[in-house]
Amino acid sequence: MAIHNKSHNNSALRSILKKNKDNLKNKTSVDFKMPEKSISLLFNEDCVKALKKIPDESIQLILIDPPYNLDLADWDTYENYMEWAGTWLDEAYRVLSKSGSLVIFGGTQFRNERSGDLTEIIYHCRHNTKWKLVNTIIWYYKNGMSAHRYFANRHEEVIWLVKTDKYYFDLDSVRVKYSPEELKNALKDKRLIPENVMKGKNPTNVWEIGRLNGNSLERVGHPTQKPLEIIRRFVKSLSYPGAVVLDFFAGSGTTGRVCIEEGRHCIMIDNDKQSQVYFKKHLENMSQTNLKKEYNRVKTINEFFKEVNSLDNK
């Protein structure tokens, strides 16, 4: 495991760390006050170097879509992928709160040991770390590339990992409404609790959410940009209002936009300076929607936690 960052002793973090020690297992979003504004940080640096600057157990949700080592570009080429991935998995474990979650987008369709296959990551976590696997989520979509030498791919896998069994999970915030006929039948089912039925159904671990088309209004120019809807479901179910979310492969900055819209604070890291352009476009798009929210952009880790702490103390 990585050496712990002792900077968590500074006063700007005490209230955050105290909150992380509370038992959040049975709480939902209604138990938290929505912050008056979200604090957002995006800076460009190697993810492992940047992670070492983040204090122990200061993050509630880590949401990442890492490179897959497919040699698509310099940022997608690693001689020993799992040796590299192991370093950020250890750092992620250190910075995550005991009630927190790590979500990793990926796939299992790669063909050699150099690839960033989720199977390899799961194997590594099981045999070399204390990470616990809660779910594999299947992201199913109808639009995709055709194929002639194999069955055309129409899904991606996402894994959800935690440090402890006391992880925060707010199912109510992401329940799916029943159709009138489904609701009628569900209320007749004696195995189901009527109060929960009225809230909606569990979306299960298979999510049908369309991929972004080239002309989608959500597009900001990043080649592997994820839809707002899928990021929003993770943010709402695995973090609470005022929580800190981390994305150290920020890419298009979609996580940052969703966090602003949902009243979370977000640290984004990416070694590509173009990520600043993508995120700026997200903010421009967001300003034209009905989900306008107050936010404050800061430039350093210390400034970020100082701002978050000041909001918590109001």
Image (spheres, helix red, strand yellow):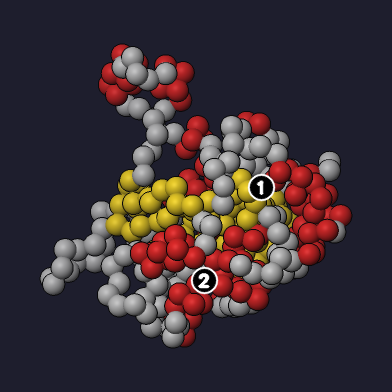
Query: In the rendering, at what x and y percent does residue 16 appear?
Result: 75, 48
Q: CA distance from mark 1 to mark 2?
A: 26 Å
Looking at this view, name the residue that lies furthest to the left.
148
209 vs 196, left or right, is: left
Give the number of the disc on residue 171: none
Q: Are marks 1 and 2 in contact (CB under 8 Å)?
A: no
Give the number of the disc on residue 86: 2
Amino acid carrying label 2: it is Gly
Query: Which is more N-terminal, label 2 or label 1?
Result: 2
| Quarter of the picture holding the N terminus | bottom right
Give the number of the disc on residue 243: 1
Residue drawn at x 49%, y 77% is 83
- Decide which of 72, 86 is in the foreground and name it: 86
Amino acid carrying label 1: it is Ala
Q: Residues within 10 Å of mark 2 (few under 14, many from 20)?
A: some
Residue drawn at x 42%, y 55% is 159
Q: Quadrant of residue 283?
A: bottom right
Residue drawn at x 44%, y 34% is 175
Looking at this view, name the residue that lies furthest to the front.
127
Q: Residues within 10 Å of mark 1 (few under 14, many from 20)?
A: many
Which one is closest to the eye, mark 1 or mark 2? 2
Instruction: Report the number of discs.
Output: 2
Q: Secondary structure at mark 1?
A: loop
Query: In the rendering, at what x and y percent does residue 314 appear?
Result: 84, 41
61 vs 161, left or right, is: right
Q: Secondary structure at mark 2?
A: helix
101 vs 149, left or right, is: right
Query: In the rendering, at what x and y percent does residue 156 appear?
Result: 33, 59
